Amino acid sequence: MTDNHDELRQRLRRSLDHGSAPELSAEIVGGAAGRPTPHLTNPARTLRIAGAAGVAVAAVTVGALVLGPGMTRAPLFTAAAAPSGEAALGSRDAVSSDAKMMAIWAEYRYFAGSSLSRDGGSGPVYQLVLDFADPTARAAELARVLGVEGAVGKADFADPAYPTWVVGPQDGSDSSLTLSAFGTGDWWFNDPTVTSVYVCDPSATSVDAAEQGCTLPSEAPATRAPSGEEARSLAKALFASTGYAVAANDIEITSGSDGTSASAYLTVDGVKTGLDWSAYWTNTGGLAYAYGHSVHPEARGTFNTVSPTDAVQRLSDYRWYGAAGPDYQGGAMMFAKGSAVEDAPGNVDGSGGAEDSGTGPEAPPAVDPTPPTDVPAEPSMPAPDETLPPVDIQPTPDVVEVTVDKAAATLLLMWDANGNAWLVPGYAMQMPEGWWSAVVSLIDGVIALPEQM
């Protein structure tokens, strides 16, 4: 035991005896006070934090990302500023005050029905990315497959913000191909030399045909436009040649006396979106027009969504609008106020003229053309005071309360401030009259909203 203790004391002494301490220079000693104090870290704790961060990074980099409480990130994009209604009229500065006043027919207030779900969820976001880097090469390729001859040039109406390319004449004298090198890379083929034979209504007479410039059904040649499965096969081959592969069963065919149309929609995750391809053959058998796009969807992650009940309040804010696919289109919202005819002066009964009593209007009483001499002269009205500001009388809109009882989750087409297209989760909500309105369902912060107009 004693030997063991002696050996142990010797080992301890050797471990503590490192010789004399080194001499430090005056510069090092003097500057020590100005140096930051070192902070020692716990290697085990550092390893645990790094491991947790690695898991978080991995979750971000793997395809789908569901943002949970407390997790934030920069918005995917900033939504376009112009609402759909004003976009159709032009910029907000170009819309006159009269046009804006005419648009105010009713104030809609939306309420969620008891049947709507109060549960949120999640949904994917896709960016629609252009398929081409060189627009001139893309335009030349489309022109080749559609049989348009000529060199690729800039369209007369193109500008730096909307670069547009064209092959063929721009005056409508022959077939042409136009390509937009922005947005969804949409293209348009048109052949004005292919026109339909205008066939009259079956009940039309020869007099009607002469007046309307149509051909009686009995005299019209048999249509040469494809129909049914033949039209589907032709449309499938046409769309595929322009870069859009679609199954024949997913192509909708509509045939009539004037021709046949074929339409297909970009389908993502089994949902038909608002982006479509179309072709039309006249009854002479020629392809009159066709159009499509040059994009493909790229996933940008999966994000939390609000409930249908919470999304109802967004119907009053145009910034949450998105275009739904064909399953939720159709119908129209009527103005709440009466028509212009009903509001016309002198039309109190809404019939557009005097009430018909069967005997005609009474003749006005006879008037002596000689004016009396004892009637004082009519006083003159004072001139208006031009210094007073004009009175801006705004119309008072009718208030319409709408209860929404039906909402379906779908993908909506949305545009960002840079002109790019996106597919985002949303709800198509059916109004009591049967028409649909769509609203984006992403939680706040996933996309940035523009300043409200």
Image: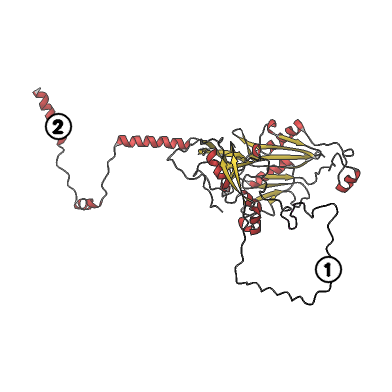
Question: Which span of residues is magenta-colored?
Answer: 344-351
Q: Position of residue 199 (x, y in %)?
A: 84, 41
Q: Position of residue 324 (x, y in %)?
A: 62, 40
For label 2, the SS is helix
For image coordinates 82% across by 36% down, the residue present is 224
Find disc 2 in the rendering and name its residue: 12
Left or right of residue 310, residue 223 in this image: right
Q: Is residue 363 above or below residue 322?
A: below
Q: Amino acid at mark 1?
A: Val
Q: Nearer the viewer, residue 452 or 21?
A: 452
Dominant SS type (magenta): loop
Left or right of residue 283, residue 344 in this image: left
Q: Amino acid at mark 2?
A: Leu
Q: Is residue 157 above or below residue 131?
A: below
Q: Position of residue 433 (x, y in %)?
A: 66, 41
Residue 379 sits in which quadrant? bottom right
Q: Residue furthest left?
A: 2
Find disc 1 in the rendering and name its residue: 367
Q: Nearer the viewer, residue 380 or 182?
A: 380
Work out whether mark 2 precedes mark 1 in sequence or the reverse, and give the earlier one: 2
Quadrant location of the C terminus in the rendered image? bottom right
